[in-house]
Amino acid sequence: DLLAAYDRLLAHPALDTSAIAVVGTSYGGYLASILTSLRPVRWLALRVPALYRDEQWHAPKRDLDKLDLRDYRSTLVRADSNRALHACSQFTGDVLLVQSETDDYVPHATIMSYRAACQQTHSLTHRIIDGADHALSEPVSQQAYTSILVDWITEMVVGERLSIIQSS
């Protein structure tokens, strides 16, 4: 359970609870987005975040109508009509949104729905991994994502620490 894992992590005494980064891919990105409405998150990194209809929240994802899901994800979904997107619309931290260029599961429209929802964020970084599929099957795609994520997290954490030092 995502909330239990988050709460356990936050209970660690050495953790800076104001500096929580959450990274999610596909269904994990969808859940990570929702998590921001339930728990404090400073940085949110989403790689090919999936999108599901709210009314299908309790349905096993493997039982969903794949054609309907593809159609839904291929349209621009408004933040006020989807729980994950609504959470993104209220999020005020920093966001990294990573898209796979040739993704058959999470199309460009889904990424743009997430991007459009992120209106209150402190910053929004959107990257596309050229030639990458949903699973990052090719080593070059995996390396590209690793570089994007590490560079972004480094930029966010170092930037945060510098702002703390400068304000002291």
Image (spheres, grey):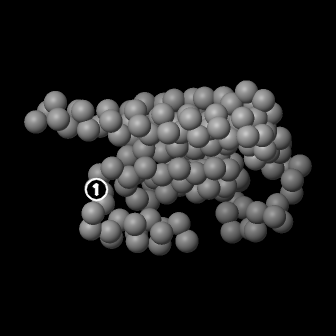
Q: How many marks?
A: 1
Pick whichever, 110 or 125, lies toward us.
Answer: 125
Disc 1 marks which amino acid? Answer: Asp
Q: Above or below — where is 40 with respect to 161?
A: below
Task: Please say if 17 is above or below 88.
Answer: below
Q: Residue at position x 45%, y 54% from top?
A: 37
Q: Position of residue 68 (x, y in %)?
A: 85, 50
Instruction: Classify residue 73 as left or right of residue 147.
Output: right
Q: Quadrant of the N terminus?
A: bottom right
Observer-nearest residue: 131 or 33? 131
Q: Position of residue 94 (x, y in %)?
A: 42, 37
The answer to whether 49 appears left or right of 107 in the picture is left
Q: Residue 168: which quarter of the image? A: top left
Q: Which residue is mark 1?
A: 16
Q: Position of residue 4 (x, y in %)?
A: 47, 72
Query: Is label 1 in a helix, a strand or a loop?
Result: loop
**Residue furthest right as drawn:** 67
Classify mark 1: residues with Cα within 10 Å, few (<14), some (14-19) or many (20+).
Answer: few
The image position of residue 55, as x and y in percent, is 69, 60
Asked if residue 56 lies left or right of residue 146, the reply is right
Residue at coordinates 53% horizontally, 66% vertically from top-left? 2
Residue at 33% across / 50% down in the picture?
19
Q: Is residue 117 visible?
A: no
Q: Is residue 41 visible?
A: yes
Which residue appears at 58% of the width and 51% of the height? 24
Give 167 or 61, whichever is nearer the viewer. 167
